[in-house]
Every structure is written in C-alpha cells, then in structure tokens.
Amino acid sequence: MQKFTLKINGQSHEVEADPQMPLLWVLRDRLGMTGSKFGCGIGVCGACTVRMDGSVTRSCVFPVAACTDRDIRTIEGLSEDISHPVQQAWIAEQVPQCGYCQSGMIMAAVALLEETPEPTDAQIDATMTNLCRCGTYPRVRKAIHRAARMMAQA
Amino acid sequence: MSHVHIRPWLITRRSLLQAAGSGTLLAWTLPAKGYGGAAGDGELLRAYLSIEPDGTVVITTPDAELGQGIYTTHALLIAEELGADWDRVRVRFSGAGEVFSNPQKKLQATGRSMGATGYYRLLREVGAMARGQLCAAAAARWQVPAGECDTESHRVEHAASGRRLAFAELVADAVRIAPPDQVTLRDPARFRLIGRSPSRLEIPLHASGRSDFAVDVQLPGMKLAALKICPTFGGRLKSMDAEAAGQMAGVHSVHALEDAVAVVADSWWEAQRALQQVKVEWDDGEAAGFDSQAMRAGLKTLVTDRDARGDGPPRVAVTIGDVNVALADSPRRVEGVYEVPYLAHATMEPMSCVARVDNGRCELWSGTQGPMRARDTAAAQLGISPEQVTVHRCFSGGGFGRRWQPDFVERAVDVARRVPGVPVKLIFSREEDTRHDYYRPAYACGFAGSVDAAGEITALQLRVAGASLFEFGRPGAFGDRPDPSSVSGLNDGIYRIGSALIDWSPLSTPVPIGVWRAVGHSQNGFFMESIIDELAHAAGKDPYEFRRALMEDERRRNVLDTVAKAADWGTPLAEGHGRGIAIMEGYGSIVAQVAEVSVRDRRIKLERMVTAIDCGMAVHPDNVRAQMEGGIVFGLTAMVHGAIDVEAGRVRQGNFSDYPLLQLKDTPRFETVIIESGEQMGGVGEPGLPPAAPAVANAVFAACGERIRALPLSRHGWRLA
Ligand code: FES
Ligand code: FES
C-alpha cells in the first residue's frame, strides 16, 4: 500500500492503495465516487471513461500510480445541476435507456466536442467507441450534434 | 423403425437437474395472490402513491427499470389520472410484495413486455382514487358536491366558482378520507401525459451518473466480493488453497462455496486480484463431456433426418393437410437448414447484488427482475420466512431476461451468510458473467416449402430442434405438446398456407438456458421471415407483394403497407444496394421492418432501418421509438457477432473482446412509424427485435443474391463495412 494524492474534479484527495490498483476502483471503492462504471475491466467497453489532462482514459486499466499530478475529471465534476450542454443535449434527445454506459458515453462526448467542436458523422463514428448494450447509438449521435450547436451558440 | 438418438454426450435427467442447481425453475406461471385492481382499497393506494406535505407526488413502480422506461411509464399513468404536474412527480422502486403483482401475470416479475399493458388499468385507478380523495377534501372545505371538483396542474378546481386549492394544501385532509369505491377514469381525449412523451424522469439521473445501480450501493462497513465459479456447468469445488490469497492486502476472507470460491475484500479489485492467487481444484462433473459443436451438428440431424430422435419424438405444433403430397407435386420447391447459436445476455452492468445476513434477517439490494422470486430464494436458502427478507430495488444496468434468474442473489446471500452482519457487495467479473449466464438456446430449423405460379404457398414444412426453455429444470412439463417458446413466431398464422407441418424436437443439454429478449421469437423470426422470403423469390414475386397477398388480417396488412411506404419500397436503389422486409407479431404488437443494406465483397453496410409498429396505443411514443431502436441493435448484434461456444462443458467466450457488440459506427439510420390502431395495447420492449435479422438477411439477398441461413455473420465469411 502506498499513499497517493489525486486531483479529481479540481479537488485534492488522499488515498492509500496498491500502485497497480486501477483508477476506476480507487474512485469507486476508496472514494465512493460511483458515477464511473465497471463494464469489462479490459479497456474495451468505455463504461469507466474519465478524462485525464483532457484526454479520454479508460480508468479500469489505468493504474493509480500513474495518476498523480494529473487533472482527473469524472462525470461527478461535469456540473452540479446537470447543466453542461452535453448533459442538456442528452436529456433533450432522451438518450439513455438502462443508463449504465451513459457516464462513460457522456465523458467521451465531452472530450470529442472539446477537440472537435463541430464533429461530422464520420468523426463521431471514429471516436465514440463506447459500447451500449441497450442500443442508444442513434440518439448518442443526435445528442452530440445537438450539443455542438448548443456550445456554438453559447 | 430404429431411431438415431442424438446424444453425443452422456447426461441423465437427474444430473441435469443437479446441473441446473436450485432455484432455476421458471416461475412465469406460479400462482400469486395479486390484486385485481379493485377500487376502494387503501392499502393498494398507499403502496403505489404518496403525496408529500409540500405536494411532491411520489409514485412507486413495481417493476425493474432495465432501460425499457417503465419508471416513467408507470409514473405517467398515475400522474395523468391524478392531475399532477409532471415536474413535481418523483419515482421510487418497490420492494417485493404481493401487492405489487402484475395483474396480468399474478406475479411481480418484469418481463414479457408486460409492464405497461399489465399495470395500465391498475395504475390509472390508483391515480383516480387519489384524485377522488383530494376532490373530496376540497369539496368539504368549499361545501360543494365532490362531483363538481376536478384536478389539474397539481390543484383541485371547482369550475363553477373558480376556486382552486393546491395539492399541498389538501394532503393532510385527503389522507383521512377513505378512497372512493368507484372511480371514473379520464376521457382519453383529455389526456395531457399519456401519448404525449413527457421527458423521461430517469434520464437526468443517468445523465449525471447519479442513478444508483446495485454496484453503486454503499453501506457502512460494506465489503466487496469477487467470485470464481466452477467453469464447467454443474461442476463442484473439490479443494482450494487460499493461504497466499488470504494474506494479500485488503483481503478480509476467502470462502469455499459448493461450486465456487469467493473472496471478500475492501475493494472489488483487491478481491478479484486475490481470487487469481487461490489454488483451486474442480470436480468437473458430467457436463465436461458436453460440446456445443457436436450438439449443434445433432440439431441439424434432427431437423433433416426424419428418423433421428432427441429427447423423444417430435412434438407437432401445426398440421394442415398433407405437406408430403403437396411438396411432391410441386415444381417450385425450396428447402434448407437454418441455424443459430447460444447467446449470452451481456448486460452492461454485470450481475451484482448487495446482501446482509444477520440474526435471522436478510436485506438485499439488487436490480432483480423478480423481487418476489429473489426474496423467496433467499428465504429458502437461509431457512427463514419471506417476511424476514427485505428487497431494496436499484436501477438495473440492462436485464433482457437475465435478471429474472435469482442465481446472483443466491450467490450474494451465500457469501454474506458467512460474514454475518457485514453487508457484502458481490459483482461478477465480465468473464464470470459471460460464462455463467442462462443462455438463449441454440436452435436449428429445417424447412421445405413450395409455391405455385400464382404466389400461393402450397406447402410449408418447418422442423425446429433445440432445448426447451420452459422445460429446463422441469422436464416433461408440456407432455407431448411443444414448449410454446420453441415454435412461437412460426405458428402465428400470418400467411395463408395450403398445407403445413410444424414440429419441434426437444434436445435437453446441461447448458443453463433462460429467457433472452424476445425469447423464442428471437430465432424463429429469423427462420420464418427468411423462409417466406425464399418462397417469394421461388414464386418470382416481389417479397412485399408476396407477403401482402397472403395476409388475411387487415391490421397486419396495414403494418406491412405502412413500413413499405415509409421505406420507399419499390423505388430504385444504387448498384449493390438492397432492401429486405420482415414482419412479426408478438407480445401483443405487430412490427414490420424494412432494412436497406449495401454489399460489396461480402462486406455489409447497414444503411437504413425503417420500422412500423402497431402496439394498439402508445403510452409514451418516444419511448416506443427508443425500444424499437434498442431492439434492432440488440437483434443485429446477435446477427452479426453473437455466438457462445461450449467446449468440454465450459463457455469459451469471456469478455467483449470475444463476445463483441455492435458499435455506434455500425449503426444504420433509424425511422419508426407508430400506428395508433386503438386495438388492445401491446408490449414494446421485445417485439422490435425479431424482424431485424431477417429484414437484413433479405436485404443482403436482394443486394447480392446470397442467402444467409446461419448466424452470426462473422462466422460465415461476412463482415460489416
Ligand atoms: S470497464 Fe473500463 S473499458 Fe470497460
Ligand atoms: S443505456 Fe444501457 S448500456 Fe447503454
């Protein structure tokens, strides 16, 4: 066990963990931040997606030891009141079904829109590799386009 | 006559039952007390609805929210009758209880697409009863007859005098008034919520990561558990050496279960890591001789060789005239074999349950589809009465039938009872989830059919073979009749047929099987609607016109016409493109789809999926659309990728790397037309799935002339573009 200081959503947290413990489990089981989900544990499904220094990271395969001095952002830090344009677009397009993949899906979409404010369908196809068993894909696509419009107007 | 027995492995009924373990009986038909939805029952009202002093309306849904949107649907039925403001409505999940039984099923169980249809009247009555109480309370204050009052926008109004009182001002009085014996339901012409698709109440929770699934439950002193189940179905734990594992950081304890090892730790990752260090010896049991490849070869023999026998003689579902005579006479004859593999549910949230067992009591937190079943399973396991078990329901990260099984609850209880007083959160790894599912059974369908020049089907012989879903764990339950799920979708009589023979050969296996979204229709839709397409081409007819001419039912024909029109059927397409059509009836709804694909070098691009659904009435039309989209993606995932193989009694696949799902980039454009026929309401969670695969297969044939008879595509030389 080692001590680590993590900066998550702008706040600093002290945790004790094995250096190999993936960030996902530090978030969920050490810090009680359960917005990021466990789906596969091998970096394939994206349910655990967070952002680290802006880039999209699958936290189930990212050891805590590599997380210090990084700016970690999770779904919990997106907004206090569900007001982030991506969340608003998600509600407007009524995207989620069971909801389980959606934190990761939203974090991936936020990152995509910061990189590419007006993504084409092809860019969405290439970036949004998160899996959704419920099949919300067509609405994810629509919501990303809608969020892009909202962010352009803001 | 001597029969070939399809038994490539040795398995007896007795060992089969043991392999299934306890608690695997399918209980769709268990009797339950249940309420008939009688008005005037205060207990019923309190179970489903409360109004807080500030006027917030809190509605209890008796169903699991699995992504099907029942959380919203149930709330809006009560809110409509109550006259509540939509943004002042909250929802909570019920626990287990007879008062929550689905009136159509007489059982509290989420499935068979019956959440809206089953509770529709009951929940409207609940809302109307509460409206009656509120109106009576206001009428007493105003000294007017209660019949002159009505509710709207969270208020009671007296139209004649223009007086109004907010719900919040009336709640205290209203609870002292007995609910009315008789209620009048609102005139549908005045609906404000039903049919209007108000924003779904669960969506802000999901969009902020705040919806609690069982994996998210946090309790003081809680520990996390990981599990390794004997990889061979029905096997047992012979011995384990947990010395090293028990000393690892964060580990609380290691437990030898009858057929599994469990590690309890401070975090799930520490539990899972320690699990790898436990040295285990399994007693594989008889299922080690089972191989799904051999079994599937057996299924093909069963549907092609009339002398072959599975568990017993084929059980006949439909006989019309003499197919042999008609087939022998026909110059336009087609025949072949269709087949589909085992499938896993692969819910995005792996199986999970929190359990605390202490002093003859048990508390459960779970996304179960069968709370009464979970409760009774835990009670039986612990030797306590069901009243001593409390079920707290959570959001479910997908269900599709998987969370109807109580196995994961049983396993959580099994671990929790060994650490009394400690709440234990059990989460299956993705691998355990994939390898210890209740699978959609593999099936084969042999067919022979003939048509005449006028486009009439003169003969249709369909022979299906596969394991019985509803005899699993209770062999022989249907006697010499077919298990209804084995032939559902084949015997609906959608088309006029001159002569027919439809039968099913049961073949039981040690593989646990269970209900999977759209159940028997999930494979039979593909068989039936592909075969009808083959017959259309054999007759030299347009597949839409061919179907249409053979349909006698107006309502079905209207669905087919609607989808054809919406999909521009018959208009020219680019080179390499094709359209396919399919229709299925089930769960009280009729769904037709037209797929458009383009094909080049055996690479398929899914271009467009158009759906028409007649579900009688749509309580929440936008959610009906979402369910059509979801059902199609689920069906096409199975069509393109889905296959579970069992080798030496063990499932080979383990994670999304070898059991892949369709991705956003693979998804076609979707359009859905909802037909409000005013007929009896049907379900929507399942019926969108069955036509998807045959519509695509028929479109591929139209595009390139190749007929797809075996799934998944990825195993038969096809890829998505
Ligand atoms: S849980 Fe991390 S990618 Fe699936
Ligand atoms: S909404 Fe259920 S997995 Fe995506």
Image (tube, coloured by chain):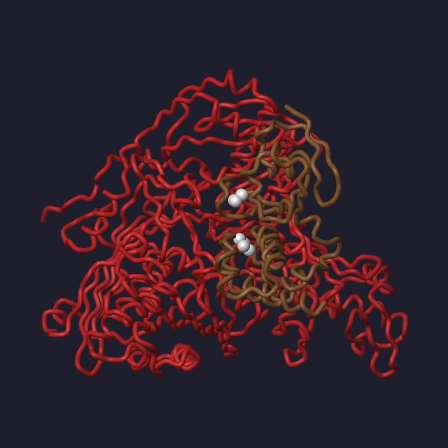
Chain colours: A brown, B red
Position of the C terminus of chain B, as image quadrant, is bottom left
Q: Relative to A25, is B410 on the left or the right?
A: left
Query: Toward which corner of the image does residue B182 lie, by quadrant?
Result: bottom right
Residue B673 position in % (x across, y down): 49, 76
- From the top left corner, tell me how far across and down residue B629 is, in percent: 49, 65
Q: Is residue B19 above or below residue B598?
A: above
Viewer-proximal residue among A17 and B699: A17
Front-lying residue, A14 or B288: A14
Q: Is residue B571 visible?
A: yes
Front in this rendered view, residue B293 or B359: B293
| Residue at the top extreme of this rendering | B243
For image coordinates 74% across by 67% down, the residue present is B180
Residue B121, given in percent of the width and then of the height, sits at: 60, 67
Q: Is residue A105 left or right of residue B469?
A: right
Image check: B453 left or right of B680?
left
In this rendering, the answer to whether A114 lies above or below B235 is: below
Q: Residue at x 27, y 55 (%)?
A: B717
